[in-house]
Image: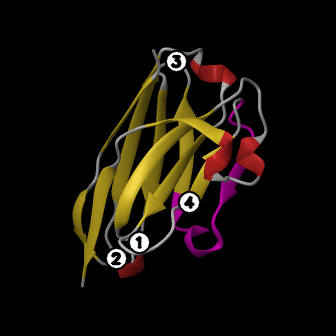
Amino acid sequence: QVQVVESGGGLVQAGGSLRLSCTVSGLIFDEYALGWFRQAPGKEREGVSCISWSGGRQYYKDSVKGRFTISRDNAKNTLYLQMNSLQIEDGAMYYCAAEGVRYGVGDLWCRGNDFGYWGQGTQVTVSS
């Protein structure tokens, strides 16, 4: 059984930083592309950042480029999202997900439909 568990969310002032972590168990971690998605109240879920199974390719939503950094530690089965210069509009529930197939290329487009294993989410709130 695949388990995806996020942590690291919280309340931060605008301009501050947070680091999200996600551990994945129940699959061979380094065979799967991974991603971070977010959903704010009343808005659709969106892909924030995704990383290929090898870690050599990353996707970023335009609005987070230069501020967020995705990385993975395959030895620890952990995915990270370093978020700097946080803005009010970054506030949302953040979800970690693993692609539904091995050695896929879902990281290229970072679309939720390509990801089959999801965590429960961690809340990020950015205050002014």
Marks 3 and 2, the one that precedes in the sequence? 2
- In the image, which residues are magenta? 54-68
Front residue of this view, candidates 18 and 36: 36
Residue 28 image offset from top left, x and y in percent = 59, 14
Earlier along the polypeptide chain: callout 1 or callout 3?
3
Label 1 – label 3 distance at C-alpha: 29 Å
- Residue at position x 72%, y 23% from top? 102
Residue under the image location 52 percent in, 50 percent down: 36
Picture coordinates of residue 68, whole percent (x, y): 52, 61
Q: Which residue is mark 3?
A: 75
- Mark 4: secondary structure: strand
At label 2, counting other C-alpha atoms closer than 10 Å, the crowd grade (few under 14, some 14-19, many 20 or more) is some
Task: Please say if 47 is above or below 102.
Answer: below
* Amino acid type, mark 3: Ala
Residue beneath disc 4: 48
Q: CA distance from mark 1 to mark 2?
A: 11 Å
Q: Mark 2 to mark 4: distance in Å?
A: 18 Å
- The image quadrant that residue 91 belongs to is bottom left
User: What type is the residue that disc 2 sits on?
Assistant: Gly
Depth-wise, is mark 1 or mark 2 nearer the camera? 1
Q: Which residue bears the numbered disc 2?
A: 15
The mark nearer the N terminus, 1 or 2, is 2
Please say whether residue 57 is visible from this viewpoint.
no
